[in-house]
């Protein structure tokens, strides 16, 4: 009887919103994939959604203490996978970022987003130092971040590497940093940026340059963003209709089932569609933050804040990218973009958060 | 959210404010995005809609085929044939694009350098179509078609191209086509022409370009990102250019060209009854097909700098002294002005003393007693020195002009040169000097300042053959659209009648007949049985130094040798054809030019008969 009640205690609002977004994703992927060689993608995404639900359940049912205690272990497991990939990973289009398990491929760098948050939350949970922290007190968590960022940047997957830095910032800020620490890190970043730019691969540098001026060479590197903006803008208020987008159906939009999936949605469903999906995403983020009422430990608070902020940031960055506000960095849009790793990781994160209300009943 | 559990509150200082900040940031970011989408989708929708349409809707040119040019018998001498170019779309190619270009080159059996050169910089526009190999022949097209599936990024582009099946033959008449230049585009003479169009650049292709070119059409198509056509939205069919029929007989044209061989010079064959040009040859010539392809700049320079001027239309632009072919003018002038009695006999001792100078006759021993007929038949210079002396230059010029020398004939080709017939007034005006009477003597035998073009000479003799009816020679018989609508048609017409008495014609034509038929005639070697010819040889002196005086022609360097000329019409009683041939540095007209005309007339008889068969009643051979 109790078990049965637990099932009824599932957060249907959260899960429902996530499912609606995922179904919208499958719908748009179907439109983006067309009838050619990619027509299996929507079905495949549906299978992945089933796996993602399992991941949600895993995050939901796992004991909170076990979760906290195993945070370092999970961190290490993902790190080892990343290092193995760097050494023996199969080369895919010049980039080693996939793990092959049977017939499936998985991107451990996606999983790293969750394990990094858990690991940092675990560190701050136990640390004896009292915030606000000075530079010396955050050396260990910084090393933890670098442990992921460096091998991923070397893959090279600069977008994900930078994103991992980004999602760890809310955790540091939640704990509190000394003003001098913030200033010195900012200066270091400002000095490091040109050095970073110099060490980039040529195509990465082209991307940043074409971001600064996309019309510079409309048939070249800036092509992606220009075409994406044309797709979005021409969608108008109500869109061109499902499967009716000329930009997407004639494949003018690059990577239109993954990174640029939102352009397809905006073209076919218009501003109304954009409003609905952005509304659902924002609602979900705020709903997730509502779990802070239920958290009793530092670890729990930081985990909820970390996972929610990561999802919000990833959504905002992806959408800003397809509209030309930010450079093309190759981050998928949560729920909507095609890709199993991203979907599974997102649902795992939701499950972890949902788990904080499970025990209250 | 505001009421956090106690334990949390204590463990993280100021957590509530920080979370409020986070929420603020997240909401703000979403609002910024929404505003941006509002801007793109609502405020700028029209602009992006237009861009999207531009993206997917292309206007694909459908070039009009250029009108076909045929000779008088319907044989195609300028055709429009499709040209196949191999092009690639980099985006659709494989990993190693350079290697793919090399593979394609190897497949066609060509060197890869040209293709790789064209391919350079392709990375900047991966969706653009790049022509890598031009003008594939049938074998190459077949080779590519069989291997097509291995090269998804490669495609064949078809464009109509001008093709001249007789290559060099009639090249100066037809001219050639090329891409329209910016100045031609700006001039407005090429109606409806657009950038990139092929237009006539020379010859008839240029003069009648607006008829021949036709009107390009286009297809409005929906394309995908790779430029593949998905849908045809609208179509404007191209209007093919009109077909042009020329007066020339390509067989005679070819024969005249062969007869001139490697010599430089020009020849013109006219139909006496109509003024139609049956053949008009300039040597050397050029291959207009070279110009229809992309002509490399170095090859263009090579043609321009060729000292033999292959692009020069000598027949209408080449200026030559007429030499003794001009004596017919002096003779007619003398008879019409009454300065010479045709039976009056002058004595020729091989030279004529005038002033302080002796004017030589070509025959060192002289011709003895000479009347008008003998003077023409044997081409006696001394007789005509005296005729000229009695006439004066202005009278000679008057009658030369009347016959059509020293003025344009009005042929329908661009750039005809009028030549030069000097007068006293002309010399005063142009040279600022008075006319010396001795210069009249030179002019009387077609030397000195007198300059004519081969087409003038042929037309002057045709005018004589027509006994005073002046016609304009012409090349374009008619122009019809592909649907058979007549756009242009030229009917023979007499533009002027010469003021010359019939008895004068009788006498002159009879004497010209003697030039060929008499045993003393200078063109006796070019006699044709059943086709009595009236003609006059000429040897135009090239200015040279004293040291070569009196030497035989074959002892003199070629570029200093005289030009050989011959002008004639035939048959005598009822003239059908008239011709003039100039062989540059060919020496005597009797040995260089006259045999060419004789050969051409024989060829004419072969195709068209002697005229006796057709109208036996009117054939009246005067001997």
Image: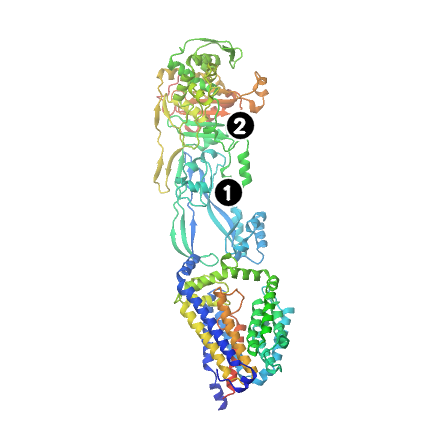
Is A134 displayed left or right of B245 in the figure?
right
- Neighbours of disc 2 within 10 Å: few (<14), some (14-19), many (20+): some
- Neighbours of disc 1 within 10 Å: few (<14), some (14-19), many (20+): some
Can see residue B161?
A: yes
- For mark 2, name the chain: B
Outermost residue toward the right? A87
Is B409 displayed left or right of B94 in the figure?
left
Is B6 displayed left or right of B613 in the figure?
right
Instruction: Give the image location of residue A52, x and y in percent.
Output: 52, 77
Which is nearer the N-term, disc 1 or disc 2? 2
Is B586 displayed left or right of B233 in the figure?
right
Q: Which residue is mark 2?
A: B263
Instruction: Give the image location of residue A84, x and y in percent.
Output: 64, 71
Near-viewer residue (B159 or A94)? A94
Instruction: Give the image location of residue B150, x and y in percent.
Output: 54, 56
Secondary structure of the residue carrying tag 2 is: loop
Q: CA distance from mark 1 to mark 2?
A: 28 Å
Taking A117 as reference, is A90 above or below it?
Answer: above
Instruction: Give the image location of residue A345, x and y in percent.
Output: 54, 75
């Amino acid at each position: 009887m109790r078990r049965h009640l637990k099932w009824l205690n599932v957060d249907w609002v959260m899960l429902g919103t996530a499912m609606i977004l995922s179904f919208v994703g499958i719908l748009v992927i179907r439109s983006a994939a067309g009838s050619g060689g990619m027509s299996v993608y929507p079905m495949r995404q549906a299978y992945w959604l089933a796996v993602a639900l399992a991941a949600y359940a895993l995050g939901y049912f796992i004991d909170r203490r076990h979760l906290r205690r195993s945070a370092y272990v999970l961190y290490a497991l993902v790190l080892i996978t990343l290092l193995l990939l760097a050494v023996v990973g199969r080369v895919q289009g010049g980039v080693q970022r996939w793990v092959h398990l049977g017939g499936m491929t998985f991107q451990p760098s996606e999983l790293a987003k969750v394990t990094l948050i858990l690991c940092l939350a675990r560190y701050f949970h136990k640390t004896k130092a009292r915030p606000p922290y000075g530079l010396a007190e955050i050396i260990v968590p910084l090393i933890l971040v670098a442990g992921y960022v460096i091998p991923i940047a070397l893959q090279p997957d600069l977008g994900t590497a930078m994103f991992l830095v980004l999602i760890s910032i809310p955790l540091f800020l939640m704990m509190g940093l000394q003003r001098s620490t913030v200033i010195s890190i900012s200066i270091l970043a400002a000095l490091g940026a040109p050095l970073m730019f110099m060490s980039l691969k040529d195509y990465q540098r082209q991307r940043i340059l074409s971001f600064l001026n996309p019309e510079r060479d409309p048939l070249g590197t800036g092509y992606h963003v220009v075409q994406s903006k044309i797709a979005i803008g021409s969608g108008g208020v109500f869109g061109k209709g499902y499967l009716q987008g000329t930009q997407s159906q004639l494949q003018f939009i690059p990577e239109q089932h993954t990174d640029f999936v939102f352009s397809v949605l905006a073209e076919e469903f218009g501003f109304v569609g954009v409003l609905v999906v952005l509304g659902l995403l924002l609602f979900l983020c705020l709903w997730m933050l509502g779990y802070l009422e239920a958290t009793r430990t530092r670890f729990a608070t930081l985990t909820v804040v970390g996972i929610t902020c990561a999802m919000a940031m990833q959504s905002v960055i992806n959408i800003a990218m397809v509209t030309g506000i930010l450079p093309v960095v190759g981050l998928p849009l949560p729920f909507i973009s095609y890709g199993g790793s991203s979907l599974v990781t997102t649902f795992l994160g939701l499950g972890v958060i949902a788990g904080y209300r499970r025990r209250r009943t | 959210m505001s009421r956090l559990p106690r334990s949390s509150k204590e463990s993280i200082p100021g957590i509530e404010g920080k979370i409020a900040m986070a929420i603020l940031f997240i909401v703000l970011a979403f609002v910024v995005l929404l505003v941006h989408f509002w801007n793109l989708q609502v405020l700028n929708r029209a602009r992006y809609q237009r861009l999207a349409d531009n993206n997917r809707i292309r206007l694909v040119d459908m070039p009009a085929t250029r009108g076909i040019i045929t000779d008088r018998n319907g044989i195609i001498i300028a055709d429009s044939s499709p040209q196949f170019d191999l092009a690639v779309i980099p985006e659709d190619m494989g990993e190693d694009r350079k290697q793919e270009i090399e593979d394609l080159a190897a497949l066609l059996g060509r060197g890869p350098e040209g293709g790789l050169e064209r391919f350079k910089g392709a990375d900047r526009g991966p969706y653009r179509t790049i022509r890598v190999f031009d003008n594939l022949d049938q074998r190459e097209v077949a080779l590519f078609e069989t291997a097509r599936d291995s090269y998804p990024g490669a495609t064949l582009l078809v464009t109509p191209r001008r093709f001249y099946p007789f290559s060099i033959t009639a090249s100066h008449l037809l001219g050639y086509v090329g891409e329209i230049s910016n100045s031609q585009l700006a001039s407005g003479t090429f109606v409806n022409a657009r950038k990139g169009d092929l237009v006539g650049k020379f010859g008839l292709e240029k003069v009648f370009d607006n008829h021949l070119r036709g009107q390009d059409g286009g297809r409005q198509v929906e394309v995908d990102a790779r430029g593949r056509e998905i849908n045809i939205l609208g179509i404007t069919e191209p209007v093919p250019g009109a077909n042009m029929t020329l007066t020339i007989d390509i067989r005679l044209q070819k024969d005249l060209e062969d007869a001139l061989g490697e010599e430089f010079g020009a020849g013109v064959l006219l139909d006496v009854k109509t003024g139609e040009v049956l053949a008009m040859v300039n040597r050397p010539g050029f291959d207009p097909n070279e110009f229809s392809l992309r002509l490399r700049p170095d090859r263009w320079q090579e043609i321009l700098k060729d000292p033999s001027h292959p692009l020069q239309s000598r027949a209408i632009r080449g200026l030559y002294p007429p030499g003794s072919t001009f004596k017919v003018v002096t003779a007619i002038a003398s008879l019409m002005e009454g300065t010479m009695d045709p039976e009056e006999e002058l004595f020729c001792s091989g030279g004529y003393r005038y002033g302080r100078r002796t004017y030589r006759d070509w025959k060192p021993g002289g011709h003895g007693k000479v009347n008008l007929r003998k003077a023409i038949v044997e081409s006696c210079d001394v007789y005509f020195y005296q005729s000229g002396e009695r006439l004066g230059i202005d009278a000679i010029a008057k009658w030369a002009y009347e016959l059509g020398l020293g003025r344009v004939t009005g042929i329908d080709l661009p750039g005809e040169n009028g030549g030069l017939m000097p007068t006293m007034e002309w010399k005063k005006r142009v040279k600022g000097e008075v006319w010396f009477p001795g210069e009249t003597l030179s002019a009387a035998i077609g030397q000195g300042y007198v300059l004519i073009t081969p087409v003038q000479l042929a037309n002057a003799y045709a005018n004589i053959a027509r006994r005073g009816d002046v016609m304009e020679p012409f090349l374009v018989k008619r122009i019809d659209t592909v649907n058979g609508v007549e756009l242009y048609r030229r009917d023979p017409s007499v533009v002027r009648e010469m003021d010359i008495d019939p008895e004068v014609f009788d006498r002159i034509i009879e004497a010209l007949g003697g030039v060929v038929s008499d045993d003393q005639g200078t063109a006796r070697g070019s006699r044709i049985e059943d086709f009595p010819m009236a003609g006059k040889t000429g040897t135009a002196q090239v200015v040279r130094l004293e040291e070569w005086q009196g030497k035989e022609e074959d002892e003199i360097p070629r570029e200093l040798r005289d030009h050989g000329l011959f002008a004639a019409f035939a048959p005598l009683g009822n003239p059908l054809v008239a011709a003039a041939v100039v062989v540059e540095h060919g020496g005597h007209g009797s040995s260089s030019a006259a045999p060419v005309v004789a050969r051409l007339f024989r060829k004419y008889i072969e195709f068209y008969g002697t005229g006796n068969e057709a109208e036996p009643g009117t054939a009246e051979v005067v001997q």
